[in-house]
Image: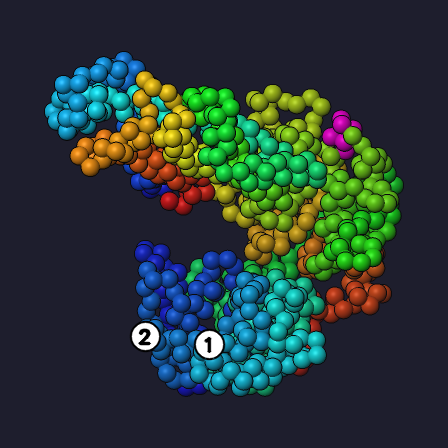
Amino acid sequence: MQGLEIHELSVAIGETRLLKSVSLSVAPGEILGLVGESGSGKSMTALAVLGLLPHQARMTGTVTLDGAVISNASDAVLRRVRGSQIGIVFQEPMTALNPLMTIGDQVAETIRIHGRGGRAEARAAARSLLDRVGLPADRFPLDRYPHELSGGQRQRVAIAIAIALTPRLLIADEATTALDVTTQAQILGLLKQLVQEDGIGLILITHDLAVVAETADRVAVMKDGEVVEVAAASRIAGGMAHDYSRRLLAAATHVPDRRPGVQTDAPAVLSVEGVVREYPGAPRLFGKRPVLRAVDDVSFSIQPGESVGLVGESGCGKSTLLRTILALDPPQAGRVLVGGEDIGRARGADLLALRRRIQMVFQDPSGSFDPRWRVHQVIAENFNLSPDRPDPVAARRRVDAMLEQVGLASADGDKFAHEFSGGQRQRIAIARALITEPSIIVLDEAVSALDVSIRTQILDLLADLSARLSLAYLFVTHDLGVVRAVTDRLLVMQAGVIVESGSTAAVFAAPTHDYTRRLLAATPDLHRNIAALGRPDLLSNITEETTP
Amino acid sequence: MTDATSARVATRARLPVALVIGGLLTAVVIAMALVSFVWTPFDVTAIDIARRLSPPSAVHPFGTDPFGRDVLSMIMVGARNSLAVALVAVGIGLGVGAPLGLLAAARGGWIDETVMRTNDLIFAFPALLVAVMITAVAGPGALNAIIAIGIFNIPVFARVTRGAALSLWTREFILAARTAGKSKTEISLQHILPNLLNLLIVQAAIQFAMGIVAEAGLSYVGLGAQPPMPSWGRMLAEAQTLIGFAPWLAVMPGLAIVTIVLGLSLMGDGLRDLLDPRLRRER
């Protein structure tokens, strides 16, 4: 039997069953997408294959690679298998690489540890591997350090290490999740190419159905430690049999029910006029200190009830712009008007009044609450903005009412934020923003860290609140799928400049700027796949497959 | 639900082992100090030449010194002095150093530079040397020892506070507090300080222990509490020449110092575990 075969694999720690009779196979040259939400057992399956389970875990079942049993093998055998026969690429390329070693040494080390050549041969091999993963010698000599590379380039180094010993199987665990969409598309393309050229089997672990649909041959859907369905990847967009797979797809493609509530004739809730924000660059020995212009003459406005998306890749100036809009940093030029008043110049009670009207939901659902404050204190902190602060009893009553409005129980106010799940924490964050009765909420990657089903609930909640309170939103995100589902208008930002803006539907249908086109082309898109289902060649593909 | 509740009760009831042991050791010394106010086995100033240098016995559990004074009584009264000096010195360090650190982290710029460079300046002097200078100018005594040790605690607390505060200032919950219109002072007191508290408590326990050692060192060279007030450091100094035939004179005050220093260090560790809500949940 060629390739990887997992048969009836079960893993338990104590009474908790983490994997329940998982059976999967990956043929040489095949890409198997392993999808599921947090805690579904995707990564646990990979760890079990690698023999890297925690010590207290009990494992039953068999794992074979090219016919040889590697489950419950001795440590010495497993060490040989790991690296030489199975390569792995993790999510975070910065922590997976040693920051003190050059990239050449790190690739060469893998080759030498497994005794595949001496120092000189290993370095030569490292060079050709880096060439192969798209890091050519003239721009990426072997003596570069990881911090001198971008996230995507680091991930290429990690891939070079993983394929250094021409493994039979490659495991990519959320390997593109932390990358920008265009970089993600390049890395996925590279993985695909390597799989085809070398006939490696690839397990692509991800929470993103769209990535799997575009990259994998087959998909395995996991839930609570079980594989609920294995199907051809072409079936993802519409042919999956299991109820949970369909729910996952529905969540991933979900479009919240939004009533058109944009008040076009009313004065704008937020208008940004020619904002410039500069940072001093690294000082030079001679000459003037250079200036980095992070936000360059940005202007836009948002109407009451309108939902606007601001997209762009990391480092494009989104976060800097946000800090300026929220009056956390002053602009060097231009101004930010909240309800017609300049928030940058407001002081004292005026500033508090403006802050009440523009509120924020942060990306990291665990980092945006003081770990020592109870939830009701966290939410009540925003009463600081009210001119007539409610007394503790009245404040608590309003906090409780707000918690119920965002779908939590009033008793939850007595807990700490870390006692909640990611989705619940985002609800708390929304409650904190809403308590001031704002006219606009800025959401900075507010749903990026959430599982798709939770993301659906949060987006529905936001749509519902917007309709009831005629709230405007500014969605700042790199996820075009979310933007498409929930925004009326779209701003595309590149290198500090808004390069394209227009209604979301129009931009998606006919992007005018080159950068927007690249961004859209790189985004894995289930809608596109569903539309493509009408194509007869894909349909014939589906009928060939039989559901296992 | 009942399972979860009983589990929580169980973890609440289980204190960190380090805290229990450290707390017991510290409590023994504190109890000795407190009891000495109302009762000691013998009068610490009563000289009884007939009983001089008697080894530990039922009457004098820790033996007697060359003047026939009871060593246990001297240690009990000396504990008062040690604890008071260290406590006030840590209080000075924490009370001045932590606010300075918070200020430096919140304001940045020249305020930060001024505070931290002044700290470096103090750090650059050997602590005991300056203590000697202060006592040389102002005369020996417990109060001057307190001031000398206290001054050297200030930069320790300022640095610890500033470093941790700087990293907290970049967190999103601080941004959230800023969008809630809180001033830098309010944020420092309501968000930064409570999140630093476990760090400061651990540091205070360490500095407390070091303060006791420093006080013993000053007394050892005759710059601490003056006779007839007993002091652990001076007891050690006086025991030095007699260590060959009256070892208990050195061992007993030495053990007292070890007990309180170990107790405070363990207690610091244990308190840190107990005070962190995240650690509490995971235990």
Residue B23 visible, this orientation: no
Q: Secondary structure at mark 2?
A: loop
Residue at the farthest front position: B241
Instruction: Name which residue lies at 37% across and 38% down.
Output: B265
Quadrant location, the N terminus of chain A: bottom left
Q: Quadrant of residue B246?
A: top left
Instruction: Name which residue lies at 48% across and 34% down.
Output: B129
Q: Nearer the viewer, residue B145 or A111?
A: B145
Highlighted range, magenta: A348-354
Q: Position of residue B228 (x, y in %)?
A: 32, 17
Task: Name the subunit of mark 2.
Answer: A
Residue picked out by circle 2: A74
Q: Is residue A3 part of the magenta span, yes or no?
A: no
Q: Amino acid at mark 2?
A: Ser
Q: Position of residue A209 (x, y in %)?
A: 59, 66
Same-chain status of marks 2 and 1: yes
Q: Amino acid at mark 1?
A: Gly
For marks 2 and 1 on the same chain, the one whose residue lies earlier in the sequence = 2
Residue picked out by circle 1: A83
Q: Quadrant of residue B163?
A: top right
